Amino acid sequence: MSFLNLYAADKPQAVELSLTDGDQIQAFLAEQGVRFERWQAEQPLNEDADQEVILAAYGNEVTRLKAENGFQTADVISLTPDHPDKAALREKFLSEHIHSEDEVRFFVRGKGLFYMHLGDKVAVVGCCKEDLISVPAGTKHWFDMGDAPDFTCIRLFTNPEGWVAQYSGDKIADAFPRFEDLAGQF
């Protein structure tokens, strides 16, 4: 189940607001300029579906987002607990950063946490299967997939080079609860 927790940026252990209803999460994030949607596959997917099959299963939604936002490419990323670079990848995503384009992720399976530093607040969004989140360009954020990542996501990019981060140097991400601390909320 998806969730959203809101914290004061200077009080990372005190939840100010907690939402689990998808429509309420969507409405709250929309006020922040963040897109949150739920998608259904157009055809059944096997656990071992490859990129081509996954993109075809969500073809109408991917095409719609490309047309609305000028995305040039879409791909699929999968990480599993036995991935040899999982620790290095986790560290790469855990530091606060921004992008020059929206960061769009659709969870085909599995789950992960998006943290968005919104002024004097931090919103933590627990995303799981069928969730799409689009973090606007220039929004300070970070992502935690846990120490045993297990997810598949569709990613959309306007920059053909893919994921390019500009790190803020702020250590705020170190103070907030991690995936392991919040996994019980999914």
Image (cartoon, grey):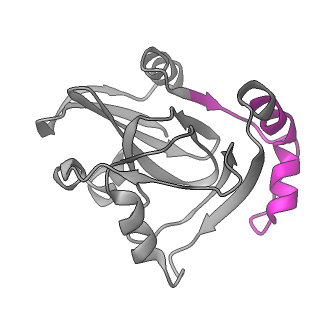
Identify which residue, 65 or 181, lies in the foreground. 65
Q: Position of residue 124 (x, y in %)?
A: 35, 38
Q: Is residue 51 left or right of residue 29?
A: right
User: Would you place residue 104 above or below residue 76 in this image?
Assistant: above
Q: Position of residue 109 (x, y in %)?
A: 63, 54
Q: Confirm whether residue 152 shows in the render.
A: yes
Q: Is residue 157 left or right of residue 36?
A: right
The residue at the point 48 percent across, 67 percent down is 149
Q: How many marks?
A: 0
* Outermost residue to the bottom: 84
User: Would you place residue 82 above or below residue 49 in this image?
Assistant: below
Q: Residue 110's image quarter?
A: bottom right
The residue at the point 40 percent across, 65 percent down is 92
Q: Position of residue 168 (x, y in %)?
A: 29, 49
Task: Check if residue 64 falls in the magenta segment.
Answer: yes
Q: Position of residue 114 (x, y in %)?
A: 42, 44
User: Would you place residue 40 above or below residue 86 in this image?
Assistant: above
The residue at the point 64 percent across, 32 percent down is 38
Q: Is residue 11 left or right of residue 4?
A: left
Task: Check if residue 96 falls in the magenta segment.
Answer: no
Q: State which region is magenta.
A: 36-65
Identify which residue, 140 or 51, lies in the foreground. 140
Q: Confirm whether residue 186 shows in the render.
A: no
Q: Residue 51's image quarter?
A: bottom right
The residue at the point 50 percent across, 35 percent down is 137
